[in-house]
Image (spheres, rainbow, N blue to C red):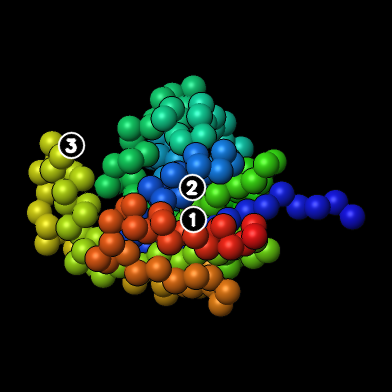
Amino acid sequence: MQTLVPVITIDGPSGTGKGTIAQRLARHLRWHFLDSGVLYRVVAIGAAMHGIAESDTGALSDFARQMRVVFSSEFESSITLEGMEIAALVRTEEAGAKASIIATQAPLRSALLQRQHDFRQAPGLIADGRDMGTVVFPDASIKFFLTASAEIRAERRHKQLINKGVNVSLRTLLNDIQVRDERDSLRLAAPLRQALDAILIDTSGMSVDEVFSQVITQVGRLNS
C-alpha cells in the first residue's frame, strides 16, 4: 500500500498569522507550501480580466479548471496568470474581498480541489487556508486552527498597510474582517470551522515567535 505524503494544515480566519506561521514552518521543515486562498484570488483576478461575473458559477468553475497559472517559487514571490505577472494584485484588499465572495460557490471549490491536491508532494506539505483540515486534507498528520479577536486582526492588517504606504481606516478594516468572517463561517460549501482533531491556538496576545514555538513543539511531538 502506497504511503501518502504527510500534510500539516493550518486553518483560521484572515489576520491570525497563519500564513506567516505556515511559510515559516515550511521553510523550517523544507516542505512544500500551499496558500489555498491565493488560488481563489487568482480566479477572482482572472475573472475580472475576462469579464466573468462573480455570480457566474459555471464560467468561474470552467476558468478555474483551465487557467494557466504558474507559481515561480514555494512562497508566491512571482505568480503569472496566462503570462501576466499578478503577484502584486493577488495581495490587494480588493482581490481578497472578491475571493471571499466567489469562494462561497461549491462548484468553484470542487474545480480547485484537484489543483490543491497536486501540491501534495514529497517530502511533505504545509497547507494554509480555511478548509484544509476539514475538506481538502482531512487525513493530515497534524492540524492547527489559529484564531484571534477581530479587533486584533484589524490592528495587525492596519499596521501592515500603513507600513506599505496604504492609507485605510481601522474602522473600515474591522468591518471588512467581520463581514468576511461571517461569510466564510456561514457559507454552505466548506465553511470556516475548526476540525474536531485540530489544535486551537489563540494568537491575540502572542508574538510570531511565540506562536511558532507552540506549533513546532506540537510537530516535534508528532515525530517523537
Which of marks 1 and 3 precedes in the sequence? Answer: 3
Q: Nearer the viewer, residue 54 or 172?
A: 172
Q: Nearer the viewer, residue 112 or 161?
A: 161
How many badges with numbers are in the image? Answer: 3
- From the viewer's perspective, tell me whether residue 188 is left or right of residue 113: left
The residue tagged 1 is 216
Q: Is residue 16 visible?
A: yes
Question: Which residue is depicted at the point 45% across and 30% down?
Answer: 79
Residue 167 figure quarter: top left
- From the viewer's perspective, tell me whether residue 59 is left or right of residue 119: left
Q: From mark 2 to mark 1, how far is it between C-alphas?
A: 8 Å
Element carrying mark 3:
loop
Question: Which residue is depicted at the point 20% across and 45% down?
Answer: 160
Q: Is residue 189 visible?
A: no
**Which callout, 2 or 1, points to the residue nearer the camera?**
1
At label 1, the amino acid type is Ile
Does residue 45 sit above or below 116 in this rendering?
above
At label 3, the amino acid type is Lys
Q: From mark 3 to mark 1, how far is it between C-alphas?
A: 30 Å
The residue tagged 2 is 25
Marks 2 & 1, CB-CB < 8 Å contact: yes
The residue tagged 3 is 164
Question: Which residue is depicted at the point 55% across and 49% down?
Answer: 126
Does residue 135 sit above or below 7 in this rendering?
below
At label 2, the amino acid type is Leu
Residue 152 position in % (x across, y down): 21, 64
